[in-house]
Image (cartoon, grey):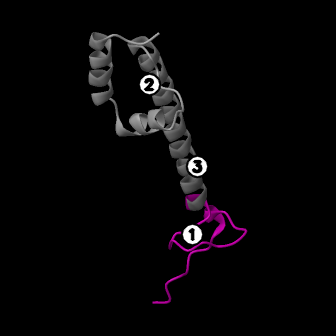
Amino acid sequence: MEANLGERATIEEFKNGLKGAILDALALRPDEPTSLNELAELAIKIDNRQHEHHLNVARNSKENSNRGDRERNCNGRREEGKPWEAVERPQNSA
C-alpha cells in the first residue's frame, strides 16, 4: 500500500528529525517502510539496538580500564603477575 501525498510529507518530516546514524541504517535497508507507523517502529528498533551497543561498548571499556588499573603499580608501571597491592614501593635512602 503506497502512502498518500500527505503521509509521504509526514514521513519526510519524521525522517528530518531522526539521528544521522538511524538515517544511515535505514538507507542500508533494501525495502523502505511504506507508512509512518512502519517507519516509526523500525526507527525505534534501530535506535534501541544502537543504544544497547553503545552501553555494551562503554561497559567493556570500563571493565578493561579497571583491569588495567589493578595491574599497575603506584608509579603507573605495570608489573607482570603482581596485583597492584603487592608491588613494593621503593624506599627513600635519604
Residue placed under numbered mark 3 in the picture: 63
Q: Give the residue number, with chain letter if any, for mark 2.
A: 43
- Reply above or below: 49 against 11: below
At 46% from the left and 15% from the top, the residue drawn is: 38
Q: Looking at the picture, how far across and down is residue 56, in whole percent?
A: 56, 40
- How far apart, in angstroms, are the residues tagged by discs 1 and 2? 47 Å
Residue 17 visible in the snapshot: no
Amino acid on which disc 2 is placed? Ala
- Please provide the residue range marked out in magenta: 69-94
Q: Residues within 10 Å of mark 1 (few under 14, many from 20)?
A: some
Q: Is residue 40 magenta?
A: no
Whichever of callouts 1 and 3 sits on the residue coming sooner in the sequence is: 3
Query: Residue, x 54% and y 51% (percent of image)?
Result: 61
Three-letter amino acid code of the residue under disc 3: Glu
**Element type at marker 3?**
helix
- Work out whether residue 48 or residue 20 is closer to the camera in this orientation and state it: 20
Q: Judge whether 4 appears above or below 49 on screen.
A: above
Q: Give the residue at the far right of this rendering.
A: 81
Quick one: label 3, few (<14), some, or many (20+) residues within 10 Å?
Answer: few
Q: Are marks 1 and 2 in contact (CB under 8 Å)?
A: no
Q: Please say whether residue 79 is one of the residues in the magenta stretch.
A: yes
Question: For this view, does 22 lie left or right of residue 62?
Answer: left
Magenta stretch, main secondary structure, is loop
Question: Which of the two discs, 3 and 2, sits closer to the camera?
Answer: 2
Mark 1 lies on a secondary structure that is loop
Q: Residue at x 58, y 67 (%)?
A: 72
Looking at the image, tell me whether mark 1 or mark 2 is earlier in sequence order: 2
Q: In this orientation, which residue lies closer to the viewer: 75 or 32?
A: 32
Q: Alpha-carbon distance for marks 1 and 3?
A: 18 Å
Q: Which residue is mark 1?
A: 73
Mark 2 residue crowding within 10 angstroms, few (<14) / some (14–19) / many (20+): some
